[in-house]
Every structure is written in structure tokens, then in C-alpha cells.
Amino acid sequence: ISSFSSSLGSGSGSGNSNSNSNSRSMSNYVIQRDNGLIIVSPKNEADQSGLVVLSHGLGDTGEGLSDVAENMARQLPHLKFILPTAPTQPVTMNMGMSMPSWYDITGLDERSNENCKGIEQSKKTIEDILKKEHETTKLPYSRMLLAGFSQGGALSLFTGMQLPEKLAGIVMMSAYLPAASKFSITPGLEDTPIFHCHGTADPLVQYAMATKTQQQVTAKGAVNYELKPYAGMGHTVSMEELADVRDCLAKVLPPDDTCKIVLKDPSEMSVKELRAAIRKAGLGQKAVGLMEKSEFVKLLKEHREG
């Protein structure tokens, strides 16, 4: 199902994120491209108290949603956004052409929608991102949210409601339930907030598919599923929709100092770790001329303490 596109300047997706390993510092956030992930995080890592994993649609890459993540980060500076890119693989519906895809799509009808080869592997990819964040920063799963556009939103729903741990919520844009016969909600996750945004004029994932998804997921036990229609909107997003998504994130992931991530003490870091943390924080210029480990430790500590 087609890649993310809108008039919001969200980028077309260059497909180069896999080869980049750099960081760029903005006003209150830092952008990193590393091992196929785009990471938009608070400039001061210690300010993070929530995580959003934002997954793109068919044929796109994480780059296609980077502007959306950056705009959200400006308004919600306590959140970190991770944008993965799907593996490139043949897609049956698109005449077998290879493109970034979270799973194979054989057609748009309900029967074809059961054939989602590769979805379990992509589900594990998202699970691994959440697990790594939890293990390295001690951020609770209850402070994490899955979001996505089209196929990425479908994957977010399929993954988020079947995890062993309950998330803060799931946001779907122009999405649907894939592989419904394989889908079941983990006991205890029934009241996970699901916010589903969908255009009434969507020619690809028709609005009827959105209402069908709500019915199916509710029948499986979900009790907190909101489907919001956007009159006349096609297979894209609008400023109104993104404002609603932002409000949803602010509601289910408000700033919470008690959930701020746990960072490794700079004095316990190796010089290599210190250099990486300093680059990530956009402190490269301030580190010019520093030679001793103690100087790097001091610079990073002062930054974290504000």
C-alpha cells in the first residue's frame, strides 16, 4: 500500500538511512542515523521520559516520516522517536517488485490480507527496539508507544496488542488489521489506547476497511479503540490529523520526571563511549582540544545537569 505522501514537506524518503551514521543537533533535539534507524531524541538525553516508534508505509523508508518526528519532537521535547526502515523484499501486489516492505501484500481484499509473509519477522524487529530501549535505559514499557502510517500502522497494531507488556498506546494512520486470523490480544492489554486516524476518501485502504478493523479488534477484546474519520482525506495525512496525533501523544505520554531514563554515569564510561555521547548531544565543538578523560566526563556531566 503506497508510501507516505502529503503536502506537509515530510520528505519523500531518500532510502539512504542504512548507510549513514551521523548526528545533527537542532534546537531542543538531536537527530542520529545509525544502522538503518533514524533517532530523534532530546538534546539532553536525561530529559527523555517516553518513546515513540514510528513505522513508515510500503515503499517508503524512515526518512519519509523524519519531518513528522522532528515536528513532534519540537512540541513534545520529553519524547524520543525511533524510525526504523523495513527490509527490501518483493511485493506480490506490486507485480513482484522489490521495495521496503514490512511484509508481503498480495491484495487489498480481506482474503488476501491474511497472506502477510514476513510480518512475524517485522513484529520481532519492533519488539527488539522496545526491548533494547527498556534494557539500556530502564524506561518502562508503559512509557512506550507504537505509531505508523498505512502498512507501518498495521504493523504497530499487530505488534503492540500482542506484546507481553502493556504499552502507553498505539496510533494508526490510514491503517488496518493485517493477518486477522493470527491476531489475538494478550490478556491484560485489552484497554490499551488505540487511536486510528483515517481519511473517508482513501482509495487504497478504504474507510470501510477502517471500520472493519475497529470491529475485528473490538471483537477480540479491545475496549479503548477510537476511530476518527477525516472528511475528504485520501491515503495521506493532514495538518489536522497530525495535530490530533500530537494531542494523543501528549495525553498518553505526558512529561513524567519519575520515568526519566537511567543513563550510564559519565565517570563509568570508556573514552569511546564518552566521545559517542558527546557527539550525540551535539557537543562536538565544545570537545575540540580536550585530551583527558576527566575533561570529557566534566563536559558531559555539565551538559546533563543543564
Image (cartoon, rainbow, N blue to C red):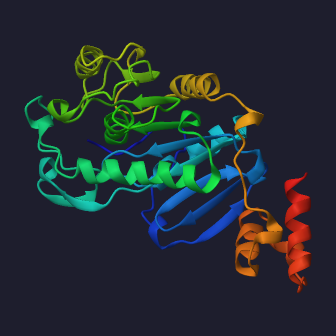
Q: Is residue 14 left or right of residue 210?
A: right
Residue at image point 65% right, 58% down? 31
Measured along the vertical axis of the image, is residue 170 above or below residue 290?
above
Q: Position of residue 10 (x, y in %)?
A: 52, 45
Using the image as rendered, state which of residue 124 and residue 195 is in the foreground.
Answer: 124
Residue at image point 12% right, 51% down? 92
Residue at image point 24% right, 14% down? 219
Q: Is residue 83 left or right of residue 155?
A: right
Using the image as rendered, state which of residue 166 and residue 21 is in the foreground.
Answer: 166
Which quadrant holds the N terminus? top left
Measured along the vertical axis of the image, is residue 251 above or below residue 29?
above
The quarter of the picture where residue 249 lies is: top right
Measured along the vertical axis of the image, is residue 34 above or below residue 202?
below
Using the image as rendered, state which of residue 34 and residue 72 is in the foreground.
Answer: 34
Q: Spot the residue most to the left.
A: 111
Q: Position of residue 79 (x, y in %)?
A: 66, 41
Using the image as rendered, state which of residue 115 and residue 269 is in the foreground.
Answer: 269
Q: Is residue 243 left or right of residue 225?
A: right
Q: Is residue 147 left or right of residue 81?
A: left
Residue 283: tell me if it is visible. Answer: no
Q: Position of residue 48 (x, y in %)?
A: 71, 45
Residue 120: tell me if it is visible. Answer: yes
The quarter of the picture where residue 216 lies is: top left
